[in-house]
Amino acid sequence: MKMLFSSYFRCFLICALCCVASSNVRGQHPEPVTLHVKDSAAQTLRRLLEAAPAEYAAKYRQHDSANMQDALLDELLRTIRHTRDFLKASLDTNAIKRELSAIRQRFEIASDGVFKNTGTLQTERNLTTSYKLIRELLERANARKAQVDAYRKKLVGFRHNFDSIASKPQLYTIPADSAEFLPVVRKLYVAAREVSPIDSILAGSLHNVQHIKDQLDLTVYELQSGLEQIERYERDLSEQTFRQEVSGLNIPPLHARPMNEILHQAFEKNRLILWFYVRNNPGKLAILAVLALFCTIFLRTLRRKVAANGLLRNDFDGQLVLRYPALSAVLIVVCVFQFIFPDPPWVFICLLWVIASTCLTIIFRRFITAYWMRFWWMIWLLFLLACADNFVLQASRPERWCMIVLAAGGILVGSWYLARGRREELREQWIVYFIWFVVIVEALSIIANLAGRFNLSKGLMVSGFISVVIAIMFLWTVRLINEALTLASDIYQTPERQLFFVNFAAVGRKAPRFFYVFLVIGWFYLFARTFYVFNLVTQPLENFLFDQRTVGAYTFSFFSVLAFFAILVLASIISKIVSFFASDKAGHPADTGSPAGLGSWLLVVRIFIFVLGLLLAFAVAGIPIDRATFVLGALGVGIGFGLQSLVNNLVSGVILAFEKPLNVGDFVEVKGKSGTVKSIGFRSSLLQTLEGSHLVIPNGELLNDQLVNWNIQKLMRRNALMVGVAYDSDLQLVESILKKAMKSNNNILAFPEPVVWASEFGDSAIGMQLYFWTGNLRAGMVAKSELIFAIHKAFREHGIVIPFPQRDLHIRREPDEEKEKEDGGDASD
């Protein structure tokens, strides 16, 4: 393109010089038009008119070509600016080359023991570690390849734009008018001067990027080929699980690799894969740390509360979870939440197990009997040695002897403690079954080792010790959780702010049953995934779930369908958990006088969670929103006709949530019933009456009926008490006594000031009306009772009589009645 511009510019310059010279000779005046005298005026006019269309057509073409040329030059200059800006923020090819070099070096490390220096045989641990490491390298190479491809595509686009503009003939049109010629030449000269350096840089960048792209393509191909080859090795190993792989221990191997090389190779591979996994999962590690922190705070708070109540035991019997709150928190969080890490490498998950088992060792040290503590020390030591042996990736004769020694140690320890008995000292009786399990598995490991089944022997040996240690950790985790729940239920009778208003009375004193099922499934999963056969069993199930299927115009997978319903169920459960934990937040609001601020938005939060879950379910299932809207519209028609009452209650619940006429924990009166609001649901709300019963009221009735909320004005309530005194009492003294009794009562507020009014002349007493304010309903009832005692005592001391109701009955006899009685008496006589 540069040469193209140069050739044209040479022509432009020659033409420009000729035009300038010609204009100088003629004095820059155009040659005048000569008219023949003999031509008539009509002929001259006809000639001019006939020449006019061609002349104007030529001018039109000239102007159109000039406009097109200007547009092309402007577009060329814009492309030059964009290209220059893009090249300024160019791709860091040096960094890509360094990373590509690092990828190839790490690929060499991953290939060691698999594609070269294979030693005696391939091992499952080495293949699995190398596969994960190469897969990580492939992901990084693909990411860089996508970046380079996008950059190259952009450069090719700029080159295409330059070539497209330069190939248009309108760009090189030379105007006939000498006055317009030189400006056009100047524009073309400026464009060529701008294009020349950009064109060189662009060509160099394309060449450099193409070279890097070729290297990346080759690296990606090699990594993909390596993964495919490892998959073939793994399938071959799985088919030969029960076949002899190595010779007997008395026969030396044909290809033996030095032990120091094996250990160095294992260290490098494990170090790399651990670094990659930690760097790829910072969010999950942060979640694990935050959960451990919150659990530690909770257990520390619980310990301080138990100690403040004088209930903390020196031997921590039933309170072991409080002995070391931080260690208990780490143990619980690691055992329960280790499953959030997808496909973790062995070195990472082993570190978690070592941390959790170390915490457990410190927690129940000097808590369990010395007899069973020695058993734990020995089995834990064997577990650590088995983990260390599993870090070794290649097979060797010394490792086979170590495997036999470790398996024999597990058999001896387990058999000794099973034979000695003393099971009554065990805190967790289920441990006995896992001791039997480790004895049997380690015996099978020795048999497989002697028979030359190295991979099977190593898998059994390692999984046996891991399974028994994990089982013991899971059993103690459940024990610690149950202890924490029991203590929290006893200590926190009402939810408190520092514990996020969790209602421990509602949570219960033990972990739910599904938690035990979860741990059993988790234990089996951790045991089974040690063997590659587990992947062969789960792979068909994974394919069945994730394979795409088409029904009409809709494409789906069974996993998307299951995920759709699972997200809806999860959203419903989470919304219920939110209500469940905050259902009794205020505890006894009448005692505290503080409104429950969380409950006012509880229903809004639940609705938000459910709607968000619905949208996520549609997104995961791949259902278009327009179709979802159509389905919801059809449901709306059915709702409008058949579910009016339900919709009324649902809408009323939303209005209650936003207007907040009542709140969770408020004391209200509705429909002649008084009680505390326990929850505000989608359709109805729950009130706990003073009698202890629970009343379910639809939200529509709460919104439409007259509702009395005693919590709106800080639960202040005016109370009245009537006292009658005898007519001969000193009313000023009575008033003084009554005011003194009210002012001395701690449950009666000083402001508004209590008052005493003489209200009426009764049949047997003068009525004295007492009005006073209390902070809440319960205080009013207590204050009335205390006032009655205090007034009765004070009246007796001052001789003031509270008269009984008295009536005078006068019997009058009429004269006629007396005469009739006398006549009747005579007749009877």
Image: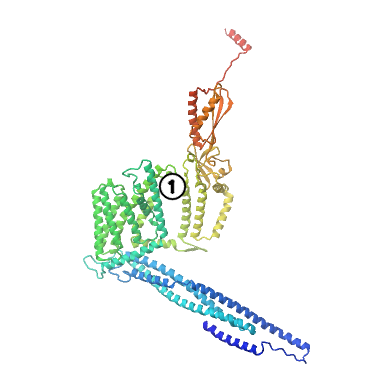
- Where is residue 601 drawn, in percent x and y? 52, 48
Question: With 60 as the anchor, is 302 left or right in this view?
Answer: left
Q: Is residue 755 above or below residue 52?
A: above
Q: Quadrant of the C terminus?
A: top right
Amino acid type at mark 1:
Gln
**Residue that carries the numbered disc 1 in the rendered image:** 498
Q: Is residue 440 above or below residue 482?
A: below
Q: How many marks?
A: 1
Q: How is the image coloured?
A: rainbow
* Residue at (52% x, 77% y) in the render: 160
Q: Can you tell which quarter of the image residue 306 is in?
A: top left
In the image, 199 versus 127, the foreground residue is: 199
- Where is residue 680 drawn, in percent x and y? 51, 46
> How dense is the environment of label 1, judged by Cα within 10 Å: few (below 14), some, or many (20 and up)?
few
Q: Is residue 645 above or below residue 768?
A: below
- Is residue 660 in view from this perspective? yes
Q: Is residue 425 above or below residue 53?
A: above
- Is residue 239 in view from this perspective? no
